[in-house]
């Protein structure tokens, strides 16, 4: 089984190839460049280095969101284009689940946090039991204070992962009372290798979709749309 994986849901752009239980190649760059310029060249590079015939892959796994609206659109469009051209199924992987899968079999609960601005995070809470990942809280967008309250209620040691860590590290230190830690640098951001590995689990369970069916998961409206709605609401209240 061969899975091609893509993740452009955040600042990191990443592409990987998984064959059975071996990660043949992974190319990740955590740098502020537009994914429209980097993702396809990265994919082309690992295909060349592994001498991969794209016709031989079984499926394309893609981080479907939440995350950067632009990044998700680029990743989904790339995956859809490849899926349509190669006539291969897509595996839609929730971004928070893929981040948590970086920390396979870590004790306690794993909490991915991605900065969603306005003191909000894209997040979820997961744990591993009998070497399988379980969802404690499904991925959602909420205030960091609300997340901390939920983690207090769960009452287990927490490992945080994601680009929200440096943004909310101080808030976590000041308000969270259960034991906690932060993922190390090599596991702290999105990785296509994790998308591929989790994609293999999804694929075995039959959780695939056609390229035509695939859509990104945004969880909330784009900022411009939210601001427009807020202005309209303010104008209505002013008239009233």
Image (cartoon, grey):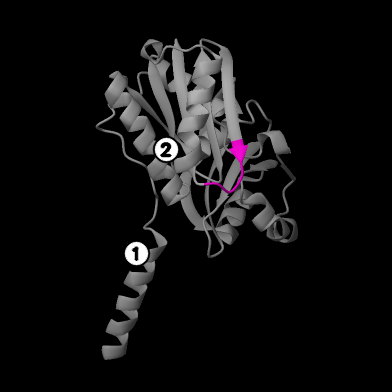
- Image quadrant in which the N terminus is located: top left
Measured along the vertical axis of the image, is residue 110 above or below residue 129? below
State whether the magenta stretch is mostly helix, strand or loop: loop
User: Residue 60 or 124: which is nearer the viewer?
Assistant: 60
- Can the viewer see residue 208? no
Q: CA distance from mark 1 to mark 2?
A: 21 Å
Point out residue 230 in the picture as x, y percentages from the top left corner: 36, 73
- Can the viewer see residue 213? yes
User: Residue 201 or 63: which is nearer the viewer?
Assistant: 63
Q: Residues within 10 Å of mark 1 (few under 14, many from 20)?
A: few
For marks 1 and 2, the one nearer the N-term is 2
Measured along the vertical axis of the image, is residue 104 above or below residue 115? above
- In the rendering, which numbered label is found on residue 225? 1
Residue under label 2, please give it. Answer: 75
Q: How many marks?
A: 2
Q: Residues within 10 Å of mark 2 (few under 14, many from 20)?
A: many
Measured along the vertical axis of the image, is residue 57 above or below residue 119? above
Point out residue 231 in the picture as x, y percentages from the top left corner: 34, 77
Point out residue 45 in the picture as x, y percentages from the top left corner: 53, 24
Q: Nearer the viewer, mark 1 or mark 2?
A: 2
Point out residue 126 in the picture as x, y percentages from the top left corner: 56, 36
User: Residue 42 or 77: which is nearer the viewer?
Assistant: 42
Q: Which residues are magenta?
A: 29-33
Q: Is residue 31 magenta?
A: yes
């Amino acid at each position: 089984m061969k899975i091609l994986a893509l993740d452009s849901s955040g600042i990191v752009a990443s592409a990987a190839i998984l064959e059975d239980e071996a990660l043949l190649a992974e190319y990740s760059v955590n740098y502020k460049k537009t994914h429209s310029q980097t993702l396809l060249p990265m994919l082309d590079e690992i295909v060349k280095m592994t001498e991969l015939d794209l016709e031989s892959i079984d499926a394309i796994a893609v981080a479907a969101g939440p995350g950067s609206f632009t990044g998700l659109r680029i990743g989904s469009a790339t995956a859809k284009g490849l899926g349509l051209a190669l006539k291969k199924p897509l595996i839609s992987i929730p971004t928070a689940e893929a981040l948590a899968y970086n920390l396979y079999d870590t004790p306690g609960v794993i909490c991915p946090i991605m900065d969603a601005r306005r003191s909000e995070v894209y997040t979820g809470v997961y744990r591993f039991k009998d070497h399988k990942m379980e969802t404690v809280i499904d991925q959602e967008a909420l205030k960091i204070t609300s997340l901390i309250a939920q983690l207090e209620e769960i009452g287990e040691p927490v490992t945080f992962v994601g680009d929200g860590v440096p943004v909310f590290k101080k808030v976590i230190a000041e308000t969270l009372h259960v034991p906690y830690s932060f993922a190390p640098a090599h596991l702290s951001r999105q990785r296509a290798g994790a998308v591929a590995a989790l994609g293999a689990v999804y694929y075995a369970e039959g959780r695939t979709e056609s390229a035509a069916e695939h859509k990104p998961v945004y969880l909330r409206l784009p900022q411009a749309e939210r601001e427009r709605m807020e202005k309209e609401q303010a104008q209505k209240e002013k008239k009233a």
